[in-house]
Image (cartoon, rainbow, N blue to C red):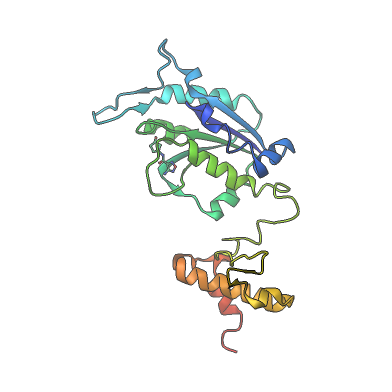
Amino acid sequence: MRVDVLTIFPDAFRGPLDVSIVKRAREDGLLDFFVHDIREHALDRHRSVDDYPFGGGAGMVMRVDVLDRALEHVRSLAPERGLVVYLSPAGERLTDRIVRELAREERLILVCGRYEGVDERFIEHCVDREISIGDYVLTGGELPAMVLVDAVTRHIPGALGDAASPQEESFADGLLEHPQYTRPAEYRGWRVPEVLLSGHHAKIEAWRKEQRLARTRERRPDLLGEGGDSDPGGAAGSANPGE
Ligand code: 4FV
């Protein structure tokens, strides 16, 4: 997968995507990641990327002409057209399902807003998907872009190595993850659930499934009953509840 990021703060991307799984995915050529400075495509000698909002109001808005020039330049750097994603609080809320969808793309072009956001004509005519990481306002789209790249990279085949697969994790079946434990088996009198020390794999799997259902019911009932593969109610339902 190729990911291009458009931002006025390229330095913001130093660090979080240079370690661990994402770093290895880049080294292994599973992820080609590029950061581009929008300001390089400014039109005036002050290299302005923003201007006052038509109709007045606080703050500044990023210019459609500068953004479009930057996008066309980045597009020209690789043959794949690329799915243009604008990170904003007004977008679709990012979910595991959307992460898996984006992970199937061969190229993503992520646009990071600043100030009050971008000119609506850029969203209307140049953006394919508008995505939000949550209902709160950040200073910029850079952190959401990093969150998205981190989440998507985990679904690139081979990125997690053979150890873990995205199939067996939170949200894969629409449920929260079961609790995890490791050595020491006892600490300050705090013990690990006996079943996990039993070596009885069927009992362990049953206990973990029950834990996933119980935690989801308690903490995220909104996840229960969602259609499709994340329909644990159905799954549980089909697990012969009547018998
Ligand atoms: C955001 C979010 C977010 C809004 C104004 C950047 C900021 C500033 N992006 N999910 N929540 N963006 O708060 O994606 O331009």
- Front residue (pair 204, 190): 190
Q: Is 190 left or right of 57, judged from the image as shown? A: right
> Residue 200, image x and y in percent?
73, 78
Residue at the farthest top position: 45
Quarter of the image with the N terminus in it: top right
183 is higher (above) or lower (below) than 142: below
Image mark count = 0
Residue at the farthest left position: 56
> Residue 117, image x and y in percent?
38, 33
128 is higher (above) or lower (below) than 77: below
Residue at the farthest bottom position: 243
Q: Is 25 left or right of 49, judged from the image as shown? A: right
Note whether residue 206 is visible. yes
Which residue corresponds to the image point at 40% horizontal and 36% vertical from the top-left? 139
- Front residue (pair 199, 70): 199
Which residue corresponds to the image point at 40% horizontal and 18% vertical from the top-left? 48
Quarter of the image with the C terminus in it: bottom right
Tell me where residue 165 sits by quadrant: bottom right
168 is higher (above) or lower (below) than 54: below
Tell me where residue 212 sits by quadrant: bottom right
Note whether residue 225 is visible. no
> Residue 192, image x and y in percent?
62, 72
Tell me where residue 58 sits by quadrant: top left
> Residue 131, image x and y in percent?
47, 44
